[in-house]
Image (cartoon, rainbow, N blue to C red):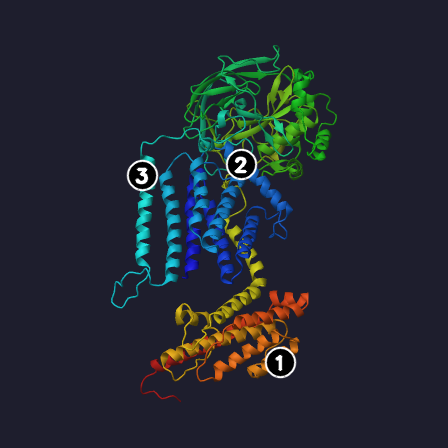
Amino acid sequence: MSGRARLTLCAWAATLLAASALLPLVDSVGWLLEAAVLLAIQSGVGAATRRVPLARTLTVLAQVLVTLVLLTLLFARQQSLGGLLPGPDTFRTFGELFRSGIEDVGRYAIPAPLSDGIRLMLVGGVLVIGLLVDTVAVTFRSAAPAGLPLLALYSVAAGISDGTADWFFFLLAAAGYLVLLLSESRERLSQWGRVFGGTPRTPGGESGPSAPVRTGRRIGAVSLGIALAVPLLPLPAIQDGLLDSARTGVGTGIGDGTAAAVNPLVALKDSLNVQKDRTVLVLRTNNPTLSDMYLRILSLDAFDGTTWTSSKRPEVAVPDELPTPTGLGADVRRAEITTRISAASWYAQGWLPMPYPPSAVTVKGNWRYEPETMTLVGHRGQTTGGASYEVKSLEVLPTAEQLAASPLAPEGLREEYTKVPESLPSVVARTARTITDGAVTDYAKAVKLQDYFAVDGGFQYNTEVKVGTGPNAIARFLEDKEGFCEHFSFAMAAMARTLGIPARVAVGFAPGSLQSDGSVSVGLKDAHAWPELYFQGVGWTRFEPTPTRGSAPSYTQPESSGSSTPDEPQASRSAGSAASDAPVASTSCSAQDKKLEGCAGALPADSARQDGGGGHWYETVGWILLGLAVVAVPLSPMLWRLRRRSVRLGSARHAPSAPGAAPPGGPEHAGAQHTDELDMTVLSPDGTGSRQAGAIATGQVLAAWRELTDTAWDYGIVPDDALTPRRAATRIVRLAHLEEPAAGSVHRVASAVEQVLYAPQPRAEPGLAGDVRVLRTALRARAGRTARLRALLAPRSAVRVVWGLGNRWAELRSDWAARWTDVVHRRRPSGEQSG
């Protein structure tokens, strides 16, 4: 392996070792395999362009273009041009995914699920760092500064992680950087020769740069030891810095940047599609109607047409008794229930899940109360991990008549919670008006919206569909009629707002599974979202538009579509229950729908995708390789021709100016440069050294001559091997209409060929590479644009590759035929005669 190739491999390995520090941040390691494959392709493109060789800036540009193509195939194939090239929609998709990833980083606790946004940030970040490392260390041959991007990559991981095995990942990153430095030092020392070499270890062995390399290894080992030991010393610690704040994350509605385990925007799909359900909460309650035991985490009240978010509102100390919910009148029947909740130790949630509306909360820890949405928010890093708490809440039981008679909401509340951005497609409001046609009251309109999604509209519950982004997401959902709770709740809340009904979205958990000991188990797959609509005199009221999930509230039944409905279940069935494969009963699924098998199970039995979509990684790699082949195959003649020109002119450039003088790097190096060009050896009577120098000179001059004739061939002058060099040169000058100095350059190369072929002591003339370049410049100047493009992209002389392959195939067949004949003769008995 050459020194440059070894350095490329070390840069690739150093980047991956530094990137391994990001592994604890997410709950999947598949992204690192994707990054390794894509980084290998990126490095391979760099190695190929450097071998051509291209200019350094062109090498970096080629790697940037390939990186964009790789990311396009992986994350935005449908938005690309021709399924391969990035376009405006591609970069728009990248921007949306990046924003989504930023939100996920701020809202998830470690380890976070591998959403599309986080996946793009991880894989794309590693590719960018890898490109910087490869550019600095390999293209510009300066490995020391390449440590800066590696340090940046490790620092991001160390700043966000919780400190688990930081020393191990630091050791990996440092080891990769030191190997990169040693590889570069070894290559430089090998070019200097034996100046710093030690004595040979074996008789007759060649000395090399082993001593400095061994010294470098020792220095590296000592440096690593010091770097690992210093953090263990009792030194003053730095508190509340940038990395400290980054460690906790930033999330809307969380006091002092507390991270959250459930992302209210995109985590529902990841929770619903986990392979194995995990118990999040265990609760005991005196509520006789378990189907109404929804646990609310927070509400999303800000809608920008693309997504729903939670507004930042002031927080206060948790009062002993919480105030009566906004808008709840004294004439509405209610009952107080008590619920004791225990959270799993791994569930580090920044909001406290509670039944709504809470009237009193008993919980230990540093919590704050947000009055507008009646939620408890963790303060200064407080989470629910392992917490046990008691919540007293109200079971509000309004009647249909009370909701129908609800007066107009206060102007300020109505103005805030009916905002709809101009970017929302008009089909959303138009569909809402069509659905509620004939309904007089806001309550009747709300029930019609709920029944449209849950019963009448032909919607299917499916957690495998893409969440969708952009202002057209709701419109696409209304057209496709397939999604999960996030789609249904977001769509109903947006449509309610277009009708002037104050609406927001609640995120939390649907009722869990009743256990044999009387407790209720709530799992990850019970994660849920539902709309809350405001009715003056009742307050914020829950609706359930998602089919086969949870239960439709009893106060929505009198005004529903009239289809017969089953009795309310005592508890919804979590994915963790024994009968998780069966459909979940729901009041939103009519008896007629059940008869027609229109109600699918709420939790797919085989939902195993957790990687944020995009298909299997090997399918993506296959598409990437296919895309590279589509690009590389048409360009292969040009790349081969550029490489061949570089080798030939490099050989001619190092031609010795006097007999017996060897080129830099020794005879081995020169022979390696033009072995494909030299098909004869000139032996002079001056001994071995002269014969060797003569062979080198012959090969160098013939390489320049072959490049000259091939250059003329690329511009339409087919070579004639029957002519002598002098007559061939005259023919090229005549057909190309060359004038001085180009004509003189052609004749000088031809004279050099005759000299090495017929002189007693062959020697190469200096400056032949320059003469060939003069000819190429003259031919380009006289050719038209089409001829120049043809000579660059589809050079005629590239047919030599086909000829060479044909010759090698013939030689291989001849060699195998000779071997087979030899084997047959050896097996034939000694006395047997051929007939």
Q: Quick check: 430 left or right of 387?
A: right
Q: Position of residue 788 (x, y in %)?
A: 64, 66
Q: Position of residue 754 (x, y in %)?
A: 51, 82
Which residue is denoted by mark 2 in the rendering? 102
Q: Quick check: 432 left or right of 241?
A: right
Q: Residues within 10 Å of mark 2 (few under 14, many from 20)?
A: some
As rendered, which of 237 and 247 lies closer to the eye? 237
Q: Position of residue 767 (x, y in %)?
A: 52, 72
Q: Amino acid at mark 2?
A: Ile
Residue at (37, 51) in percent of width and height: 179
How far apart are labels 3 and 2 at the CA level? Answer: 34 Å
Which residue is denoted by mark 3 in the rendering? 229
Q: Amino acid at mark 1?
A: Arg
Residue at (64, 65) in percent of width and height: 789
Q: Amino acid at mark 3?
A: Ala
**Residue at the top extreme?**
330
Element at label 2: helix
Is residue 586 something that shows in the picture? no
Label of residue 808 in the image: none
Sequence-first disc among 2 and 1: 2
Which residue is denoted by mark 1 in the rendering? 731
The image shows residue 436, relative to residue 125, as above or below, that is above
Q: Residues within 10 Å of mark 3 (few under 14, many from 20)?
A: few
Is residue 52 something that shows in the picture? yes
Element at label 3: helix
